[in-house]
Amino acid sequence: MEIRTIAILSPGDMGHAIGAVLHRHGLRVITSLRGRSARTQALAKTAGMQDVPDDETLVREADILLSIMPPASAYTFGERIASTLLHVKTELLFVDCNAIAPRTALALDQLLTEAGAGFVDAGIIGGPPRPDEEGPHIYVSGTRAADVACLSEHGLDVRVVGAQSGQASGLKMCYASVTKGLTALATEALTAGRALGLQDTLINELQDLPAFRSIKRSVPGMPPKAYRWVGEMQEIARTFVDLGLPSQMLEGAAALYQFVESTELGLEKPEQRQRGQTLEEVTEILANALQKQRKPEQDN
């Protein structure tokens, strides 16, 4: 498959970084910025992405469309593109790169295939690619996975994991349940320790654990992404339910990230950090938010 133009929606933290890599490696990268925030428009410009006026232009000009957005928006966006394809003749290959359950990936596969597009399931493991750093692993699955694997020739690390849609998403769900699940558990435990006046003693006990070094990075790094991780934890919960596994732990993680998003930490942006840049700052802000929540209850 000859690839000249890649469409990316949305050019947020991950999307614009992947777009920048593809642009640096000689591909034309397009997006549609209609109605998008000033921040998103600035990120797209930084990545060298070209703005096109509407979805019809996007699907007409792109060889591959990479859907990279909060999990809660993934299926709705698929419906939007499927609707657009009813009016545009194209050989578009739609690649869903979102943190979604295998059943959601399978539903998208059916939706987009019936609309006339090719479909590939993808799961991104790792953070946004940065210059001079190893980028994320992008696992792909489905009958057209090999067509996406050729993006490895354009700066990305794409790995075929299987021939069935849902396999790449399933791998992402299992991996994220450990990494982001641990971040949620650590955030909740350390916030509880702070609220109980025991944080220093708790940290003193935890610091000898091998995982604590990772926790010291992941908890302060989490606030700008908490809003996205709510939907991701819910998708992992669906994955586990479909397998007959308990889902309550992931539902609790979703609730924890929803709580973080509701505090002043929810205002943070990855490139403009002001609050919660250390473990201690994050737990202090969350413990204070808990205290404010409890005060009206105590007054009643």
Image (cartoon, grey):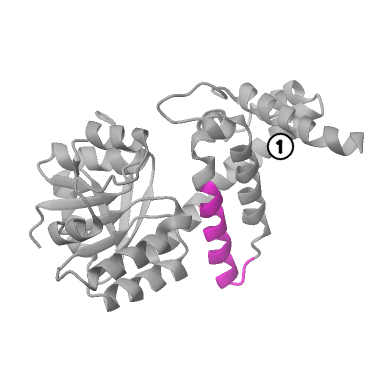
- Seen in the picture, residue 167 relative to 65 is either above or below; the reply is below
Please state which amino acid type lies under the numbered disc 1. Ala
Which quadrant: the C terminus?
top right
Q: Nearer the viewer, residue 123 or 300?
A: 300
Q: Is residue 238 left or right of residue 26?
A: right
- Seen in the picture, residue 234 relative to 209 is either above or below; the reply is below
| Residue 148 drawn at (x, y percent) | 21, 58
91 inside magenta stretch: no
Q: Is disc 1 placed on a helix, strand or loop?
A: helix
Which quadrant: the N terminus?
bottom left
Residue drawn at x 84%, y 35% is 296
- The span picked out in magenta is 229-245
| Residue 179 drawn at (x, y percent) | 52, 45
Disc 1 crowd, CA 10 A, few/some/many (<14, 14-19, 20+): some
Q: Quadrant of residue 3?
A: bottom left
- Seen in the picture, residue 52 relative to 283 is either above or below; the reply is below
**Can you identify the residue that label 1 sits on?**
189
Residue 210 visible at all: no
Q: Nearer the viewer, residue 212 or 249?
A: 249
Residue drawn at x 35%, y 41% is 12
